[in-house]
């Protein structure tokens, strides 16, 4: 765990904000670090209108098959208002009272640090055989990590461009695990964790967890739309009960009519999703090994991420990075962004178990 914290603090030390930051040095740090571990890694560049190229890191640990699980995150971060007061400098990773503070701590340099540790574990176990390797990853598939740039600016000059210019990197990918899920919230007598199966495709769409809206016909309209999501595999049946009773996560309530119209249009075009039906049990059991009372809540997130570029090309992708229940989302794109050591511990151990148990 100390290594993850150290890497996270070093990653935060690089100013990669989308206004005056630069990802070149951060990308070099990631490549040099994983190469020192013995992992093959390279930097790829894509052109941007600003003239400053986007930088992307691709690393892989070969398994017994070329079929690949890809761990994805982005190194660029949102900008911050230098006229607002942070308790700790946003471009210096600072550990205080069991938390790491700094821009990108949650979105999403913590994910990069955990992914780097999982890649290191895979590399350390790849040569082990017999009883020595029984508690290691020793994967039947290839494990890869992709850290991209320009996600905060829409990804067109980032991951989208990389997938167009270097399609060979994505030929053997069977599943992507990225950001967008893992936020815990209580409902009834259970603790639920969001499991991202989809996201809104553009800023005009309002796809997401529904506001209950007014009584009467709107309730039945909501149920009909959500049931379509259940039938297509994006939700679990519990979503209907949740939206009737609560209608929001973390206080995010959406306008009723734009929500309905956006969801109807979204579902009309969306293909069926199988990520929850195929992989949900593995993720649930891994989560419950650390948080016994936890359950998954498949959802379509109201915000969007680079995950959509994989989905547009038919590559299955799950947004999931579990946080401790005490870790708020305070500071993402705002002041005093942080992640707790408890969350880093939870995310690492849950994801390690997932990678040991999953089959593609």
Image: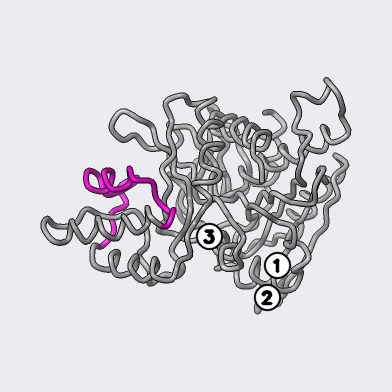
Determine the secondary structure under disc 1. Answer: strand
Dots 1 and 2: beta carbons under 8 Å?
yes
Dots 3 and 1: beta carbons under 8 Å?
no
Q: Position of residue 289 (x, y in %)?
A: 54, 25
In the image, residue 191 lies in the stretch drawn in magenta: no
**Extreme residue in the left direction:** 216
The magenta segment is: 232-255
Going from N to C along the chain, the mark reached first, 1 or 2, is 2
Q: Position of residue 133 (x, y in %)?
A: 81, 26
> Which sits in the foreground, 109 or 83?
109
Dots 2 and 3: beta carbons under 8 Å?
no
> Disc 1 and disc 2: Cα gap in Å?
7 Å
Report the residue marked by disc 2. Answer: 48
Report the residue marked by disc 3. Answer: 305
Q: Residue at x 50, y 41 (%)?
A: 87
Would residue 112 be found to the left or right of residue 231 on screen?
A: right
Determine the secondary structure under disc 2. Answer: loop
């Amino acid at each position: 765990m100390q290594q993850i914290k150290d890497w996270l603090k070093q990653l935060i030390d690089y100013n990669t904000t989308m206004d005056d930051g630069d990802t070149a040095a951060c990308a070099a740090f990631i490549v040099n670090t994983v190469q020192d571990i013995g992992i093959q890694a390279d930097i790829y560049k894509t052109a941007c209108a600003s003239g400053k190229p986007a930088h992307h890191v691709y690393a892989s640990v070969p398994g017994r098959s070329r079929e690949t699980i890809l761990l994805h995150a982005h190194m660029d971060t949102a900008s911050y208002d230098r006229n607002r007061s942070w308790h700790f400098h946003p471009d210096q990773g600072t550990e205080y009272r069991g938390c790491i503070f700094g821009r990108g701590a949650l979105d999403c340099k913590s994910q990069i640090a955990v992914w780097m540790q999982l890649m290191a574990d895979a590399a350390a176990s790849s040569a082990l055989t017999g009883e020595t390797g029984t508690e290691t990853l020793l994967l039947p598939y290839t494990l890869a990590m992709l850290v991209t740039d320009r996600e905060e600016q829409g990804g067109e000059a980032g991951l989208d461009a990389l997938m167009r210019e270097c399609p060979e990197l994505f030929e053997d990918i069977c599943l992507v695990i990225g950001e967008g899920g893992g936020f815990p919230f209580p409902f009834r007598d259970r603790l639920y964790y969001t499991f991202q199966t989809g996201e809104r495709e553009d800023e005009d769409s309002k796809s997401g967890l529904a506001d209950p809206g007014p009584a009467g016909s709107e309730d039945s309209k909501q149920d009909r739309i959500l049931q379509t999501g259940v039938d297509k595999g994006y939700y679990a049946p519990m979503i209907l009960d949740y939206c009737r009773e609560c209608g929001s996560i973390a206080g995010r309530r959406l306008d009723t009519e734009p929500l309905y119209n956006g969801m109807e249009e979204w579902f009309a075009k969306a293909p069926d999703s199988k990520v929850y039906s195929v992989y949900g049990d593995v993720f649930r059991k891994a989560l419950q090994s650390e948080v016994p009372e936890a359950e998954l809540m498949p959802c379509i997130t109201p915000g969007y991420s680079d995950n959509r570029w994989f989905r547009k090309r038919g590559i299955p992708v799950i947004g999931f990075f579990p946080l401790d229940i005490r870790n708020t989302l305070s500071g993402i794109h705002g002041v005093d962004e942080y992640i707790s050591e408890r969350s880093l511990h939870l995310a690492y151990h849950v994801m390690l178990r997932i990678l040991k148990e999953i089959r593609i």
